[in-house]
Image (cartoon, rainbow, N blue to C red):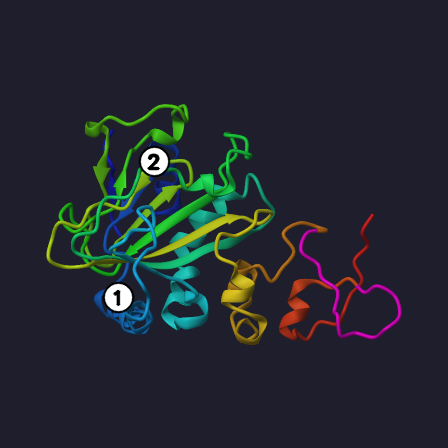
């Protein structure tokens, strides 16, 4: 099964159709050169200070740099990109009232980096979720060209419909080769992995992942982007970080410094010093 590529003016409907059929798709050149250069300039100082991976899965020649919502204004814009966010909301909202940001990570595969083991990202939650629930939608934004030689993401289109016991044949594995500024969409259920970098240049992209609002995030956004930083963000981004209730009674908190008598249950937005008054939330 091929991995298809859509033009930069693709609609969410087109992306969703590819995700349903193949589990993955490339949207070509969605970001302009200037936007990519700005992103790269903002994240590269943090990447340079990041150590290589600690094992074969994270990549002994691979750097993974997080906390991007706090560190990069350009990345914050990318998180709320209209095509990505609309697609993520529509893909996940059959299973949740709200979606949240699961992961922000620059992935830099350096020369000599070995191919990662083929896997499904949804296994971050083990095998506890029913197979018919899609827990996440992932994007990888190319900050450099992605080629077969420099470690373009490997993918097995259609494998989101397979039995989990089925292993791919070599001819079923393709690579998400794309130009700088393109984005690779893939579901949490599709088989994929980082490719081997046999070139002389590094391959770098930004992995931004969205998940169901009632699941625990892979990257702890409350520590990676605490209220002291998140309070100045757009409310849409604040909600994605998790500073909102995923369901009616999911995610409230009590102010440990409030000496008012009685239990006051507060919405997470209150931690960001929103103008809204404190409200009590009835919990049965």
Identity of the residue drawn at 30% across and 33% down: 157
Where does the image place residue 198, in percent across and percent down from the top left? 13, 49
The answer to whether 194 appears left or right of 111 in the picture is right
Q: Where does label 1 land, which residue?
A: 36
Identity of the residue drawn at 33% across and 33% down: 22
Residue furthest toward the front?
A: 54
Q: Nearer the viewer, residue 55 or 236?
A: 55
Query: Could you tell me what secondary structure mostly forms the magenta stretch?
Result: loop
Q: Where does label 2 land, which residue?
A: 191
> Which mark is drawn over residue 20?
none
Q: Residues within 10 Å of mark 2 (few under 14, many from 20)?
A: many
The boundaries of the magenta stretch are: 250-264
Number of marks present in the image shown: 2
Question: Does the segment drawn in magenta span residue 263?
Answer: yes
Identity of the residue drawn at 24% across and 51% down: 28
- For label 2, the SS is loop
């Amino acid at each position: 099964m091929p991995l298809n590529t859509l033009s930069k003016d693709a609609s969410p409907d087109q992306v969703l159709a590819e995700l349903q059929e193949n589990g993955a798709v490339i949207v070509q050149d969605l970001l302009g050169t200037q936007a990519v250069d700005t992103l790269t300039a903002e994240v590269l100082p943090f990447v340079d200070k990041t150590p290589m991976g600690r094992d074969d899965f994270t990549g002994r020649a691979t750097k993974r740099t997080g906390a991007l919502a706090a560190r990069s204004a350009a990345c914050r814009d990318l998180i709320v990109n209209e095509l990505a966010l609309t697609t993520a909301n529509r893909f996940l909202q059959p299973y949740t009232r709200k979606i949240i940001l699961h992961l922000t990570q620059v992935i830099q595969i350096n020369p000599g980096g070995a191919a990662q083991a083929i896997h499904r990202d949804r296994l971050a939650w083990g095998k506890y979720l029913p197979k018919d629930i899609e827990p996440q939608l992932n994007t990888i934004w190319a900050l450099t060209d992605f080629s077969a030689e420099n470690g373009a993401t490997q993918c097995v289109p259609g494998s989101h419909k397979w039995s989990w016991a089925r292993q791919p044949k070599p001819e079923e594995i393709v690579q998400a080769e794309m130009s700088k500024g393109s984005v690779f969409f893939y579901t949490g259920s599709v088989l994929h992995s980082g490719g081997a970098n046999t070139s002389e240049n590094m391959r770098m992209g930004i992995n931004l992942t969205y998940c169901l609002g009632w699941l625990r995030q892979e990257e702890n956004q409350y520590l990676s982007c605490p209220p002291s930083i998140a309070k100045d963000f757009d409310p849409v981004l604040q909600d994605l970080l998790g500073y909102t209730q995923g369901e009616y009674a999911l995610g409230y908190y009590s102010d440990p410094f409030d000496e008012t008598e009685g239990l006051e249950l507060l919405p997470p937005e209150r931690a960001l010093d929103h103008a809204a008054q404190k409200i009590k939330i009835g919990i049965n």
